[in-house]
Image (cartoon, rainbow, N blue to C red):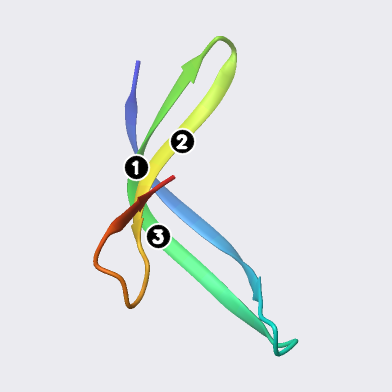
Amino acid sequence: MTKDVLISLKGLQFGSDLENDRVELITSGSYYKKNNKHYILYNEISEGFTEETKN
């Protein structure tokens, strides 16, 4: 059974200039459990790009 969920991800992005940038993503997605494993699926549009990334 698939459920619609709201996903919130927070983390740090490390760049080549040794500076850390805080990253936060809030998006809708779906959740399901199969063979005793949990799965979360969502699409992300990165800044400066027009195509979605499927995660």
Q: Is residue 47 left or right of residue 13?
A: left
Measure the alpha-carbon separation of dots 2 and 3: 13 Å
Q: Horizontal and vertical percent for residue 51?
A: 26, 60
Q: Which residue: 66% across, 80% down?
A: 15
Q: Residue furthest top?
A: 35
Judging depth in this view, the residue of 22 and 54 nearest the camera is 54
Q: Is residue 40 left or right of residue 53?
A: right
Q: Horizontal and vertical percent for residue 38?
A: 54, 25
Numbered disc 3: secondary structure: strand
- Name the quarter where the N terminus is drawn: top left
Report if the CB atoms under discs 1 and 2 are less than 8 Å apart. Answer: yes
Of mark 2 and mark 3, the one earlier in the sequence is: 3
Q: For the residue carrying disc 1, how many other residues have a C-alpha within 10 Å: few (<14), some (14-19), or many (20+)?
A: some
Q: Is residue 4 above or below residue 10?
A: above
Q: Is residue 42 above or below residue 52?
A: above
User: Which residue, given by chain and number where applicable, does mark 3 sit on?
Assistant: 26
Q: Is residue 12 above or below residue 42?
A: below
Q: Horizontal and vertical percent for residue 8?
A: 47, 55
Q: Which residue: 70% across, 83% down?
A: 16
Q: For the residue carrying disc 2, how many other residues have a C-alpha within 10 Å: few (<14), some (14-19), or many (20+)?
A: some
Measure the alpha-carbon separation of dots 1 and 3: 10 Å
Q: Which residue: 43% across, 49% down?
A: 7
Q: Amino acid at mark 2?
A: Ile
Q: Amino acid at mark 1?
A: Gly
Q: Residue furthest right?
A: 18
Q: Quadrant of residue 46?
A: bottom left
Q: Quadrant of residue 55?
A: top left
Q: Residue furthest left?
A: 50
User: Which residue, given by chain and number where applicable, does mark 1 sit on?
Assistant: 29
Image disc number at residue 40: 2
